[in-house]
């Protein structure tokens, strides 16, 4: 999905909601464990319940890889079930030397045809650029995250600026706003303002809303641009909104609530 198509979907739905499918078998409703593929049964119901309000689904591959070959099959079935016109993210956080990154890129852009994959930039240009060779695909590069450990490296001084700012500026020069997004945490409005000023045209994938304490108003007020420029991810707050047989209805209600909060930012 290219930028024009993504922006059209966002403005059509008046939403920047991304639903994270971090499906943990220990947390899904117990009655689904009788299904042949419990995780897929859960994902299918969540997708059906939220597809009218979301513009993206983020599949956290760790929750599927941990289940071995069956988990990879569940991930593929889930990816194939997501409706056309909704942006897909492989949250895999890959990044290695060039020839290895080339294979990771083939995995998530060819073998499993996601629209995007999350990428770790620590090893530098040759670990990211192979992902940028696929037309119509996106690399979502870790920029400023909302976890406590982000202070260990990202917030440290690197010369006359913090390291995360150097990473953002350097990585942005390797591609364009048409093929690079950045992961930007949602918990501090000052940093959202600062990063948007630094990168006025790029899309940000924003975790940290909901269970981690961020909120839609803060993110949109401080980082919205002319194309919206945001994908706000909510995982646990939607997919685990209910634990009984009505879990999908609860997920639907939460997704609708988030979309309504977002809709006010579309003029």
Image: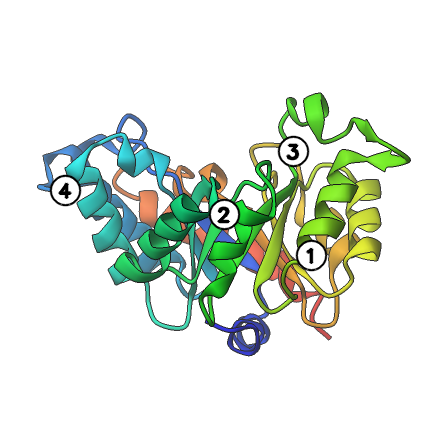
> What residue is shown with label 3?
146
- Chain-order first, disc 2 or disc 4: 4
Name the image quarter holding the N terminus. Answer: bottom left
Q: Are marks 2 and 4 in contact (CB under 8 Å)?
A: no
Q: Nearer the viewer, mark 1 or mark 2?
A: 1
> What residue is shown with label 1?
172
How far apart are labels 1 and 2 at the CA level? 15 Å
Pointer 4: residues within 10 angstroms few (<14), some, or many (20+)?
some
Does residue 2 appear to the left or right of 32 in the view shown?
right
- Chain-order first, disc 1 or disc 2: 2
**Image coords of residue 84 (percent x, y):** 35, 72
Q: Is residue 119 above or below residue 89?
A: above
Say what secondary structure mark 2 lies in: strand
Q: Residue at x 46, y 59 (%)?
A: 56
Say what secondary structure mark 1 lies in: helix
Q: Residue at x 77, y 43 (%)?
A: 166
Q: Is residue 228 above or below residue 95?
A: below
Q: Which mark is residue 37?
A: 4
Q: Is residue 255 above or below residue 10?
A: above
- Chain-order first, disc 4 or disc 1: 4
> What residue is shown with label 2?
118
- Chain-order first, disc 3 or disc 4: 4
Q: Residue at x 56, y 73 (%)?
A: 3
Q: Are marks 1 and 3 in contact (CB under 8 Å)?
A: no
**For residue 143, which quarter of the picture?**
top right
- Chain-order first, disc 1 or disc 3: 3
Asked whether 4 or 174 is in front, the reply is 174
């Amino acid at each position: 999905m290219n930028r024009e198509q993504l922006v059209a979907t966002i403005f059509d739905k008046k939403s920047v909601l991304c639903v994270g499918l971090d499906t943990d078998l220990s947390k899904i409703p117990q009655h689904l464990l009788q299904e042949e593929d419990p995780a897929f049964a859960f994902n299918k119901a969540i997708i059906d319940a939220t597809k009218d309000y979301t513009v993206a689904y983020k599949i956290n591959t760790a929750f599927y890889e941990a289940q071995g070959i069956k988990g990879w099959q569940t991930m593929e079935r889930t990816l194939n079930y997501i409706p056309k016109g909704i942006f897909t993210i492989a949250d895999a956080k890959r990044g290695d030397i060039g020839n290895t990154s080339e294979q990771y890129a083939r995995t998530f852009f060819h073998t499993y045809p996601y629209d995007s994959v999350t990428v770790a930039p620590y090893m530098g240009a040759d670990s990211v650029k192979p992902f940028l060779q696929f037309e119509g695909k996106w690399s979502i590069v870790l920029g400023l995250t909302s976890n406590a450990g982000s202070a260990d490296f990202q917030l440290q001084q690197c010369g006359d600026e913090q390291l995360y700012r150097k990473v953002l500026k350097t990585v942005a020069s390797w591609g364009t706003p048409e093929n690079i997004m950045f992961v930007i945490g949602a918990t501090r409005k000052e940093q959202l303002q600062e990063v948007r000023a630094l990168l006025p045209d790029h899309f940000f994938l924003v975790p940290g809303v909901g269970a981690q304490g961020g909120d839609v108003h803060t993110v949109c007020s401080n980082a919205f641009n002319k194309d919206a420029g945001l994908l706000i991810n909510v995982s646990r707050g939607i997919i685990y909104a209910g634990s009984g047989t009505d879990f999908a209805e609860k997920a639907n209600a939460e997704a609708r609530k988030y979309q309504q909060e977002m809709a006010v930012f579309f003029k």
